[in-house]
Image (tube, grey):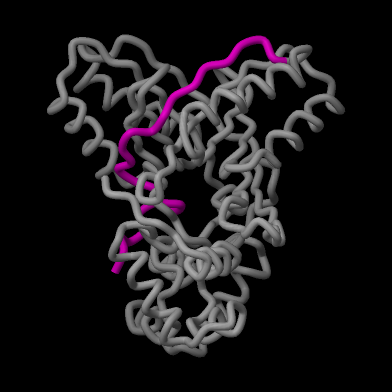
Amino acid sequence: METYGLDLKDKKILVELELNSRRSNNQIAKKVNLSKEVVKYRIDRLLEKGVILRFNTIINYFKLGYSKYKLYLRFTNIDKNKLEEIGKYFNSHKNTEWVVLTTGRWDLITSFIVHNVNEFDDEIQFFLNQFSVFIQEKAVTTTLYLVHETRGFLSSENKAINRKIVYHTSKDKTEKIDKLDEEILKIITNNARTPITEIAKIAKTTPRIIQYHLKDLEKKKIILTYKSHLEPKAIGRIFCKLIIYLSNPTEKRLNSFIGYCSKIPGVVWPQRVMGAWDFELDLELNDYDEFQKIILEIKEKYSDIIKNHEFCIVSKEFKLDFFPECYKTL
């Protein structure tokens, strides 16, 4: 993939989209001291060049009674066509959130947003009935705590981003939503910049009602924030996942470990999980050497609680949908 060189103006615009991608071109223009026409031109160009894939609404599905389970697969006796077929199978599934091919410890990772473990098990059993002959190994985790970090590498050398911590956890209190709320979430999950008038048209109601429901969803922290989803390869970066096994740390030591990992430059999704291992760290980095350096520094600083680690690098992303059955980019 041909890489695109971000200049300072691009980075300033991307920072504003990181903090709130529903901001209008005019609002962004005032923040970055550019005209709204220039902002529109540059956003359109970043979309055209594949730097921005879509504008995501970050939804706290835990508050809606959902759980998140991840399935990790290592294959055997499989060719590229079959691997692509399996990736497309998960991509078309209504309850999958994230589907990627990777190199390293695992060949494919997919996450499901479901109501309970039995629903997840039903989906896995159905998959195994079709593809079990190709599966050498599998592992399962459930997400306890997930953070959406602000991309620090977009900041200039002299000015750091005002870091915005956005997280959700399986402990969050559940909230009830109605059919219109659900429709709004489906519309804006992959289209955070969709105008209220357009949302109203699709949902067959008025802009005033949509505005009210959006504010209510934000107030209840069902909608956490609005961000842009970038393609790391398009700007010469790689997406890495570090999997960490911990050895019964104290609460104080665990919190120190999580806090340290969350502030590492390049981190996008630090998350606590329960299952085969204990913690995952997703990063967008310049290259493998930077990834290796980060691994060594973490192991050195927390050698007393890290029992083992594994890693993989994402080679292809099929899907990233933060809400079940949401609509594709309009």
Does residue 28 lie above or below 274 as drawn?
Answer: below
Q: Which residue sits at x=52%, y=83%? A: 34
Q: Which residue sits at x=78%, y=12%? A: 304
Q: Is residue 309 magenta?
A: yes
**Which residue ends up furthest to the right in the rendered image?**
252
Q: Is residue 69 magenta?
A: no
Q: Which residue sits at x=51%, y=39%? A: 285
Q: Which residue sits at x=25%, y=44%? A: 92
Q: Quadrant of the N terminus?
A: top left
Does residue 115 lie above or below 276 as drawn?
Answer: below
Which sits in the foreground, 45 or 330?
Answer: 45
Q: Is residue 290 left or right of residue 180?
A: right
Q: Is residue 5 left or right of residue 177?
A: left
> Does the magenta stretch mainly form a helix, a strand or a loop?
strand
Range drawn in magenta: 306-330
Residue 296 in the image, given as x and y percentages of width and height: 64, 19
Which sits in the foreground, 61 or 235?
Answer: 235
Residue 87 in the image, given as x and y percentages of width and height: 25, 34
Does residue 87 lie above or below 80 as drawn?
Answer: below
- Residue 202: quarter of image: bottom left
Does residue 295 lie above or below 286 as drawn?
Answer: above
Residue 10 in the image, given as x and y percentages of width and height: 47, 67
Q: Is residue 247 left or right of residue 239?
A: right
- Residue 93: quarter of image: top left
The mark tally for this picture is 0
Q: Quadrant of the C terminus?
A: bottom left
Residue 237 in the image, given as x and y percentages of width and height: 43, 42
Q: Is residue 234 left or right of residue 240?
A: left
Which sits in the foreground, 117 or 83?
Answer: 83
